[in-house]
Image (spheres, grey):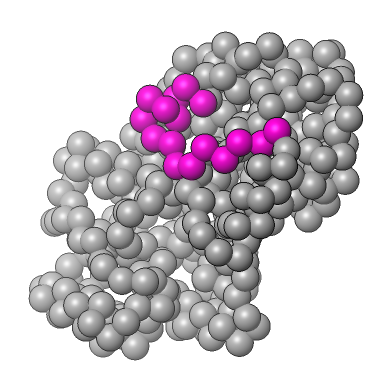
Amino acid sequence: MTVTFVVPPADVPSGGNTYDARIAAELEASGRPVRRVEAPGFWPRPGPADRERLSRELALLPDGAGVLMDGLVACGVPEILGPHADRLRIVTLVHLPLADETGLSPGTAADLDARERAVLGMTGVVATSRWAARRLADHHGLARVHHVAPGTDPAPLAPGTDGASHLLCVASVTPRKGHDLLLAALARVDGPPWTCVCAGPVGRGGYADRVRAAAEASEVRLAGALTGADLEAAYAAADLVVLPSRAETFGMAVTEALARGVPVVASRVGGVPEALGRDPRGERPGILVAPEDADALGDALRRWLTDPRLRGRLRTSARRRRSQLAGWRQAARAMGAVLDREGCR
């Protein structure tokens, strides 16, 4: 049976968009037909025309059809999914709980949270890490939440720059990703020189403008969204990858760094410790710091820059960790098993 996969517009590079595209492609390659439907709109709060379009799309599906829906589209519109929940086999893929996005007013967050609870109570649910699955189950009172972690493409070892000074952050410039914390931490780092490139979409107004102004006054370069060979070159030049997020369900930039043998300094939030993992000898291939703590982040970066023994230990651990990373084919097999268990055959 063909599975209909409903996704938001892939207009900017993001971990969620990459996950959706790679899972769809690998499901197809494994012999499970996938019909990918891109739902226009400003999700999770679409306009009337986009709501009507999604409703019509679901109404056209035959009874018993399997539907995998990106949670950004599904979780804000229980009134649209409700009429189809009993006749379709719907599985909701939650990349990030709606209320966990930073910058929301308390009222908006509460409304989105209630809408998400209603949707997840009437569909199958899959999250992108064990931590996220447990949190969804506990927070929304769900009996079962599956998890399918992102895959990671094999990559050559990154040669780096000088082994220490070139830092890379791969993340959209949004409050949740914590670029302001990174800039504040780097301002506290004295000693050896460093450079830092931030690769990710940069918007306009508010937070993005403040980050842009602070970066221009420092050694931090906002490179914008990088894809393909440009992103590969950024990883190849990196000595250390930094992810200062306030919230993450997994953190694909972590495993992308480890695939290249690059150590990571990251916030100890959500599924990041799971993504970072431990090498076969039980050692961490990076440093985890308390979230929202620019001093702790600055201290970790200072230790990295000034302690060659620490750098050598973390780099060795990161290279050992590479062999443990699952690929997208394995992720798609796990997603296929979830769809089977939820009746999307």
Please give the range of residues in magenta. Answer: 219-234
Q: Quadrant of residue 331?
A: top left
The front one of 133 and 24 is 24
Quick check: 329 above or below 166?
below
User: What percent of the width, then of the height, locates residue 272?
Assistant: 64, 45
- What is the x, y in percent for residue 188? 87, 39
Magenta-colored stretch includes residue 255: no
In what quadrant of the picture does the C terminus appear? bottom left
Image coords of residue 326 (percent x, y): 46, 32
Q: Position of residue 286 (x, y in %)?
A: 72, 30
Q: State left or right for residue 294 relative to residue 332.
A: right
User: Is 211 in front, or is 335?
Assistant: 211
In the figure, is residue 321 to the left or right of 289? left
Q: Name which residue lies at 44% across and 49% down.
A: 14
Rendered view: 131 above or below 104 = above
Magenta segment includes 233? yes
